[in-house]
Image (tube, helix red, strand yellow):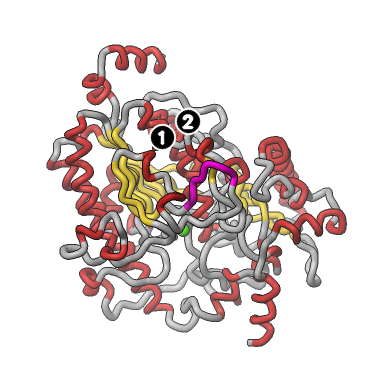
Amino acid sequence: MKKILFMLVCLLGSHVVAVGRPNFVFLFTDDQSYKAMGCMGNTEIHTPNMDQLGAQGVIFDRHYNTTAICMASRASVMTGLLEYKHGCNFQHGSMTRAIFSKSYPVLLQQAGYYTGFAGKFGFAVTDEVSKNSGHNSYDQLPVDSFDDWAGGVGQTDYQTSKNEYIKQYADTYPHSTRAYGAWAIDFIEKAKGSGKPFCMSLFFKASHLPFNPDPFFDDLYEGKTFSKPANFGPENGEHLAEQPKQGRQYLSYHKKNGYFTKYDEVKRGYYQLISGVDYAIGMVRAELEKQGLAENTVIIFSSDNGYSEGVHGFSGKCLPYEEPSRSPMIIYDPRRPGNGARTPAVTAGIDVAPTLLDLAGLPIPANMDGKSLLPLLENKEPRVREFLPLMQLFGSAPTLSLAVVSEDWKYIYWAYEDDGMEAVEELFLNSKDPREMTNLAADPESRQQLEEMRSAYDAQLVHWKGNALNYNDYAQYADVFNREIEWDAKKDLYHKSAISNYKKELKSKKEQ
Ligand SMILES: [Ca+2]
């Protein structure tokens, strides 16, 4: 039926298409913890616009990134593909243009949408397979794939003047977060003038390190102190496996990240960056109202990964634990408002692309791993999947892992066995133990659930084996993470593929 409707509106001409299809505003932050919004119960952060969006739309309480690191996560969000199918991460390589040609911005543009991108793109798109995963020049970014481009290279910069495509806003908005808001206002006006439906992807640099927030918001957190979560600090990580403690997520906690030595100061900077984004969201929404577009514009708000903020002794992201792998997710579709509904369904960054396509009435490519969230928005289904994989394929070799998560449970397998470690299984009842303080893998009463989660994990590896790209170091991980293959038979594969500064980090740790 949808296809017939789509053909009809196409036949009737572009004006009808513009009226019949929603516009999209996709607001995307960097490294924002799922806890860092008022509407997630946080009373210490100031996010009135995020909270309003949540009060009007649907809040996804269990939203994950299947890879919790900028580059791979962004590639998954754009393509709806798991990392081992899009091939893109630090230490692995770029995305081919052929794969990017099936991303949501390209598919929406082909279907008649006016498309725009601003901010941190975060991964390279190249004609040929490339081990070079840099995205530090514009010829590695798909500038020509958008009608309006204001993306930056690499990590981009908080100083507006240092970003080529938004520097014209530097006088009024010297910090890039509000400058992106100003760019969005101009984009919305141009998009309206195009007579087409539009899709604007606004990818903020905030709240990524360095925590250099906009001084415009200095008053918000001046002198404030912040509570620590109950699972804060290494004393609440003693029950966890040794493998995840061998990477920079753990080491940086003890060295430079500051969550241990200057918690309130770090938190002030982080929250102030997020409040800056919140303000820019207000700028965007006011412009949608002003242009008369608010009633037909779907707003999606999310982040590329979460943030540990010192829990269990970890900082940063990457790991499959709740704080680093979960991120905020709100969808507000004014045609089907959720009015603050919340769902415990397990959702992920890979669901963004299929959801956008579905809302636009377009077919979802069969190759996409993500699911349309439309059944959740319409309250027609309680969930879109039973199990979701979480993969960590960047950094120190021991920290590489695969996990699977369901609404109730999470199973993590740490395969690494050198340096005195043995493979470890972790099983958490997340629905009752969201802070992951009790590993139930050896609990006799959880034996059945352990077996179920092991089966889901093994099934994911079968999918991996059958679908992984044969380049950029992905295929071999189907064996590396296999529970049935002995360490001696796979350790060479592991070390060959894990381009790691692990030994250097370990040496540094011992010297402290
Ligand atoms: Ca990130």
Tell me the quadrant of the picture where the N terminus can be found. top left
Q: Is residue 108 above or below residue 47?
A: above
Disc 2 versus disc 1: nearer the observer: 1
Indicate yes or no: mark 1 CB to ligand 1 under 8 Å.
no
Left or right of 347? Residue 279 is left
- Residue at the spot 74% in from the left edge and 48% down from the top edge: 476
Magenta stretch: dominant secondary structure: loop
Q: Is residue 397 above or below residue 108?
A: below
Q: Is residue 198 above or below residue 278?
A: above
Q: Please, which residue is most extreme toward the left here?
A: 290
Foreground of the two, 395 or 346: 395
Residue 146: x and y in percent read: 34, 40
Task: Check disc 1 and give the amino acid type.
Answer: Val
- Residue at the spot 14% in from the left edge and 39% down from the top edge: 291
Q: Are marks 2 and 1 in contact (CB under 8 Å)?
A: no
Please report the bounds of the magenta region as a residue range.
123-129
Disc 2 designates what residue?
381
Question: How many numbered marks have been drawn onto this rendered protein structure?
Answer: 2
Disc 1 designates what residue?
106
Task: Check disc 2 and give the amino acid type.
Answer: Glu
The secondary structure type at the circle numbered 2 is loop
Residue 322 seen in the current view: yes
Residue 509: x and y in percent read: 65, 81
Determine if the magenta segment contains residue 124: yes
Left or right of 131? Residue 478 is right
Indicate yes or no: mark 2 CB to ligand 1 under 8 Å.
no
Q: Could you classify mark 1 by the number of other residues whose Cα lies within 10 Å: few (under 14), some (14-19), or many (20 or more)?
A: some
